[in-house]
Amino acid sequence: MNKFKVGDRVICLQEQDKNKKIINQIGTVIQLNGTTNVRIEFDNNINGHSGNGNAKGKHGHVWNVEVGKIDFANLSPILEKFSKLF
């Protein structure tokens, strides 16, 4: 079972499909893809895509990532606002 759910704030710890721009980026889970993969809309542009179907996000901000490469962001409200600046 996937420990993440839609709406969770997560941080990416490793690259996925050779995209290193997602490392240390914070985003929101917008879709669960089975038990091993999630679609994330990152706060910053990571040279991604915009998603598809019901899981669309900002152009360039979306990427599919294996659940073993992300963790919960656990941000305070102040850090949450700060993270969106970079």
Image (cartoon, rainbow, N blue to C red):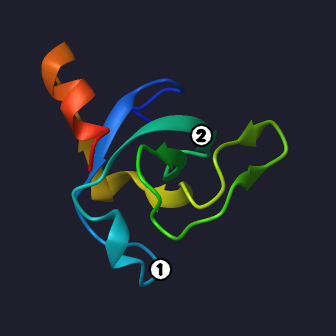
Q: Tag 2, which secondary structure?
A: strand
User: Mark 1, residues whose alpha carbon is within 10 Å: few (<14), some, or many (≥20)?
Assistant: few
Q: Is residue 13 left or right of residue 27?
A: left
Foreground pick, 52 / 37: 52
The numbered mark, 2 or 1, whose residue comes first in the sequence reads 1
User: Mark 2, residues whose alpha carbon is within 10 Å: few (<14), some, or many (≥20)?
Assistant: some
Q: Nearer the viewer's eye, disc 2 or disc 1?
A: 1
Q: Tag 1, which secondary structure?
A: loop
Q: Is residue 78 left or right of residue 50?
A: left
- Give the quadrant of residue 77: top left
Residue found at the far front of this picture: 85
The correct choice, above or below, for 74 with respect to 13 in the image is above
Residue found at the far bottom of this picture: 18
The correct choice, above or below, for 67 with respect to 71 in the image is below
> Where residue 67 appears, x then y in whole percent?
39, 51
The correct choice, above or below, for 47 with respect to 33 in the image is below
- Residue 76 appears in the figure: no
Residue type (three-letter) at the residue carrying disc 1: Asp
Q: How many marks?
A: 2
Residue at horizontal 15 percent and vertical 27 percent from the top: 79
Residue type (three-letter) at the residue carrying disc 2: Leu
Query: What residue sits right under mark 2 in the picture?
Result: 32
Res 60 label? none
Foreground pick, 43 / 5: 43
Foreground pick, 14 / 67: 14
> Where residue 23 appears, x then y in whole percent?
26, 64
- Give the quadrant of residue 59: bottom right
Query: What residue sits right under mark 1 in the picture?
Result: 17
> Where residue 47 appears, x then y in whole percent?
52, 71
> Where residue 25 appears, x then y in whole percent?
29, 53
What is the CA distance from the residue labelled 2 to the residue labelled 1? 18 Å
Residue at horizontal 48 percent and vertical 26 percent from the top: 5
